[in-house]
Image (spheres, coloured by chain):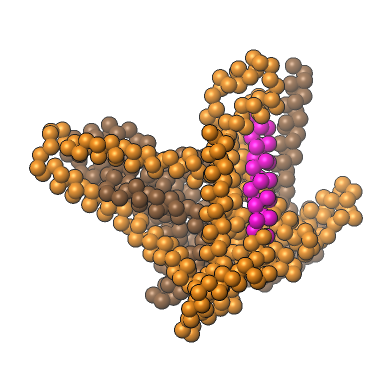
Chain colours: A brown, B orange
């Protein structure tokens, strides 16, 4: 019994050490961010006095009012739009099964392995041709398209797992396809849709390459893409960069802590289902 | 995304072919025997079904598939993005494989697989082992912490780690603290070590993802197997290698696929940490595709490199699935 206790203690020691390894970088940038701007500092140096000025400075110098606004605009449109498109398509592919649904499903799934590099090169010139570069609409449509393979796949597997009696009962009552979806299936689908929405928000918020390419104008970029630009300008001002990084990760960390369960089910079931 | 997941879509056609074997069967909801109108109704319903797919399909085709095909087309051209392009056949592909800068970027991406894929899978398995069984208190807290890096934007992760790897950064401070002060350096500025340092950021970011996948998989393992192993006198470690590991084959495959794609298609992290330097020792295909296309106006070469990268992703993902299916049978 004592040996087992000992083994358990060892486990906790290892886990705590690893957790510290994950968290130390955060501690380091939090400590750096409250140092006076431009200070030469080292590792985990404790600030002599806590100053919040870096956050205001980074916010202003990095034009984060504009960047955050762009991030919010893009995410607020992309998440519902992608969720609705994916839900309609997933419902059709799983329940209505029109001709060719097998090929269509396969077409969407193949997109999961497509690296965005192969999309963005021509995407820029295609969007330029129709005046959608430097435009929210261009970014929004490109992001929705990029997330469609996972979204459709996620909703399709969700609807395919629903009891067929539910759907058949609705059909016998003479319900139309849309009514079956809205009245019978959707009320039981909110957990799946919430999870999808949380993942879509994460991908939209974290998107970088696509924004860099489509938004050639730095002022129109989203927060992470703006941070990438900011890093190039203030390479050595560690307190300022740390504050800017914290500004960019704060929203996604908040969403993660609030919807922690959805992140986990989304990532695990989405991959394995 | 694995042999497991590809099963999901094929399940649907299987039920469809059952329908096909009974061609006279009325569509769902029509309880009576076939009527002349039934077939038309079915067709109508099928057409309506396509209508539901339309919005997703239009956006996907227009903004992902069409550009991807266009990139393939551009890869056969010599084009600066402005003047009329000229057709050069496979010349851009020849350049990808012969130009040392371009071909070495592919090698770097392959090296990154070790750190983005192999290391996280091993660490993820270790964490899974540590978080299973007798341990109860704090499991959720540990899971939340270990998974956290994965949800962060890689640009912010990169910015943070630039500072960690700095001459005065945390890594060197910790080395000094344990008496290894002689080994301190600016890690991302060392031509021999920058790629490894970069790779370890990937390990930091992706290990929690692997852990989550494995923990979810471990929950599905029949508990009877553990009881049987305990009766046979197997300790926790033996149980892990004899029961847990074999039970996680599917999840390991999935993790390998996701992380391999992340390694090959890496861009964000490299862009903010090293931007390919020092002396091109950390260039990756994604970075050069961006640079060639959008700062050097060599659209054709950028496209060819992107196509080669895509082919590499598809080849490696297929290889992983093939090996996994061989192991399964």
Residue B56 horizontal/vertical position (percent): 35, 56
Residue B249 horizontal/vertical position (percent): 57, 36
Q: In this view, does A31 lie to the left or right of B71?
A: right
Q: Is residue B220 left or right of residue A51?
A: left
Query: For the point 21% across and 47% down, which residue is it?
Result: B45
* Residue at the top extreme, as displayed: B231
Residue A105 horizontal/vertical position (percent): 37, 49
Is residue A270 magenta-colored?
no
> Visible in this render: residue A189?
no
Q: How many labels does the image show?
A: 0
Q: Nearer the viewer, residue B95 or B293?
A: B95
Q: Which of A249 and A11 is in front in this view?
A: A11
**Image-quadrant location for residue B144:** top right
Query: For the point 66% across and 46% down, which residue is it?
Result: B118
Query: For the point 53% across and 72% down, which residue is it?
Result: B90
What range of the chain is rendered magenta?
B108-132
- With respect to residue B229, does A112 lie above or below? below
Q: Is residue B75 left or right of residue B56?
A: right
* Residue at the left extreme, as displayed: B36
Query: For the point 68% across and 45% down, which residue is it?
Result: B119
> Visible in this render: residue A195?
yes
Residue B279 horizontal/vertical position (percent): 74, 69
Chief secondary structure of the magenta portion: helix
Q: Nearer the viewer, residue B265 or B141?
A: B265
């Amino acid at each position: 019994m004592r040996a087992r206790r000992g083994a358990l203690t060892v486990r906790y020691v290892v886990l705590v050490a690893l957790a510290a390894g994950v968290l130390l970088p955060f501690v380091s940038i939090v400590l750096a961010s409250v140092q006076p701007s431009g200070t030469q500092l080292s590792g985990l140096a404790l600030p002599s006095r806590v100053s919040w000025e870096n956050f205001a400075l980074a916010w202003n110098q990095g034009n984060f009012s504009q960047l955050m606004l762009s991030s919010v605009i893009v995410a607020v449109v992309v998440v519902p739009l992608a969720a609705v498109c994916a839900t309609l398509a997933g419902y059709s592919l799983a329940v209505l099964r029109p001709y060719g649904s097998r090929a269509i499903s396969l077409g969407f799934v193949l997109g999961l392995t497509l690296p965005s590099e192969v999309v963005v090169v021509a995407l820029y010139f295609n969007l330029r041709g129709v005046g959608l570069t430097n435009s929210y609409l261009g970014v929004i449509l490109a992001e929705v398209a990029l997330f469609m393979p996972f979204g459709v796949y996620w909703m399709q597997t969700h609807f395919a797992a629903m009891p067929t009696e539910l759907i058949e009962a609705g059909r016998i009552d003479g319900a139309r396809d849309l009514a079956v979806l809205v009245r019978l299936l959707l009320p039981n689908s909110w957990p799946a849709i919430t999870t999808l929405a949380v993942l879509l928000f994460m991908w939209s918020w974290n998107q970088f390459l696509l924004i860099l390419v489509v938004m050639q104008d730095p002022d129109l970029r989203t927060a992470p893409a703006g941070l990438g630009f900011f890093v190039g300008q203030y390479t050595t001002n560690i307190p300022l960069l740390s504050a800017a990084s914290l500004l960019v990760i704060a929203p996604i960390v908040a969403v993660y802590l609030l919807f922690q369960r959805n992140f986990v089910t989304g990532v695990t079931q989405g991959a394995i289902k | 995304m694995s042999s497991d997941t590809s099963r999901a879509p094929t399940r649907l056609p299987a039920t469809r072919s059952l329908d096909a074997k009974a061609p006279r069967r009325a569509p769902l909801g029509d309880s009576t025997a076939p009527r002349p109108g039934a077939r038309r109704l079915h067709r109508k319903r099928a057409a309506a079904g396509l209508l539901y797919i339309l919005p997703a399909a239009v956006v996907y085709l227009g903004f992902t598939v069409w550009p991807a095909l266009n990139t393939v087309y551009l890869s056969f051209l010599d084009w600066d993005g402005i003047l009329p392009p000229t057709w050069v056949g496979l010349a851009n592909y020849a350049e990808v494989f012969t130009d040392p800068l371009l071909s070495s970027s592919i090698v770097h991406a392959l090296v990154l697989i070790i750190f983005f894929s192999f290391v996280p899978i091993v660490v993820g398995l270790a964490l899974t082992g540590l978080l299973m069984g007798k341990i109860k208190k704090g499991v959720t807290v540990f899971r939340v912490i270990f998974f956290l890096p994965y949800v962060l934007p890689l640009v912010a992760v990169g910015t943070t780690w630039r500072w960690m790897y700095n001459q005065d950064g945390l890594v060197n401070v910790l080395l000094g603290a344990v008496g290894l002060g002689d080994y301190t350096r600016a890690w991302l500025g060392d031509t021999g070590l920058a790629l490894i340092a970069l790779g370890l950021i990937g390990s930091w970011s992706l290990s929690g993802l692997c852990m989550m996948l494995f923990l979810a998989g471990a929950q599905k393992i029949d508990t009877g197997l553990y009881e049987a192993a305990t009766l046979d006198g197997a300790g926790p470690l033996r149980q892990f290698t004899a029961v847990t590991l074999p039970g996680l084959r599917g999840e390991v495959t999935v993790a390998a696929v996701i992380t391999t794609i992340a390694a090959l298609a890496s861009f964000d992290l490299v862009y903010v940490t090293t931007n390919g330097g020092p002396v091109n020792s950390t260039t990756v295909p994604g970075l050069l595709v961006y640079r060639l296309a959008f700062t050097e106006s060599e659209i054709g070469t950028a496209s060819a490199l992107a196509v080669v990268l895509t082919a590499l992703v598809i080849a490696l993902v297929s290889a992983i699935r093939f090996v996994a299916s061989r192991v399964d049978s």
